[in-house]
Image (cartoon, rainbow, N blue to C red):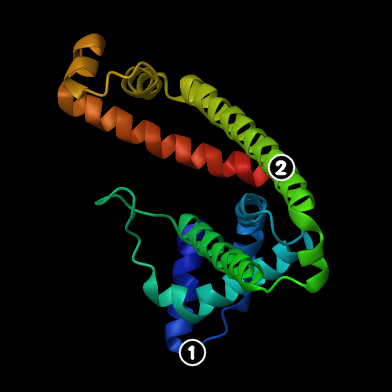
Amino acid sequence: MTDEALFARVAEGRASGRDVSAPLGTLIERWRPGALYVIRRVRQSYGKGSPEDDEELLQDAVAKLVERGLEQFRGISEQLPGKSASPKTFFMRIAKHVAIDRFRRTREVLAEAPESEEEDREGASGASGAAERSTAVEGSRRQEERTEAAELYWAAYRRLQREHPNEASAWDLYHHQDLDDHQEVAKRLQITVTNSYKRVSRAQAYLKAYLLELGGEG
């Protein structure tokens, strides 16, 4: 069964009070790789926690889906009004926000913690050196993340070129070549402006799906 069909079975079963553990478990296993990837990226961006936290946060996301998400899902995209949204994308968003909330709270608690007397005696020199090391590590980590994100994007774009060359051509003109003008894109490709909008929109949807798959593969 498709994700949509299973999700509908879960929602209907929950509304009627039936046991939905079987279809829900199937969905979570399908979505687990992508959700853990999203959680890991959030954890790395905050520089807090450990890999052991990822599974716990995944379970928190599942609990949030069951408690509130099933009633909140409307099947409409927040990023592309008028477009449909998949249950998987909806769950990825839940996992992302659960992780953000956890590590943001952790960072705020650490920031508010009073310094110990021993830390006060370390002096300005030690604090400055630690700050410099922290900045260097953070810069290196962010550069690594940017490189990884770029590699994922270009892998997704190469797949778009193979599977949907028309959409890839429109996307290349509109984004890579910075035309940012559907009339100019339509003129270059000898298509209508409406078709330019459609091709760029479809390209964006394909790329998002490819990136989710690539992210799930880790």
Q: Please give the name of the residue rendered at 62% of the width and 65% of the height, measured from the top-left corner.
A: 107
Which of the pair 10/99 is nearer the observer?
Answer: 99
Image height of 136 relative to 49, above or below = above
Residue receiving disc 2: 132
Q: How far across and how far down the image is residue 24, in percent? A: 58, 71
Image height of 122 relative to 186, above or below = below
Residue receiving disc 1: 17
Q: Please give the name of the residue rendered at 31% of the width and 35% of the height, measured from the top-left corner.
A: 201
Q: Quadrant of the N terminus?
A: bottom right
How crowded pointer 1 is (Cα within 10 Å; few <14, some 14-19, many 20+) is rated as few
C-alpha gap between disc 1 and disc 2: 57 Å
Which of the pair 25/64 is nearer the observer?
Answer: 64
Residue kind at label 2, given as amino acid type: Glu
Image height of 124 relative to 104, above or below = above
Q: Quadrant of the C terminus?
A: top right
Residue 4: image quadrant is: bottom left
Can you see residue 23?
Answer: no
Q: Secondary structure at mark 2?
A: helix
- Left/right placement of residue 214 relative to residue 134 reads left
- Between tags 1 and 2, which lies in front? 2
- Left/right placement of residue 174 relative to residue 61 reads left
Q: How far across and how far down the image is residue 160, in percent? A: 47, 26
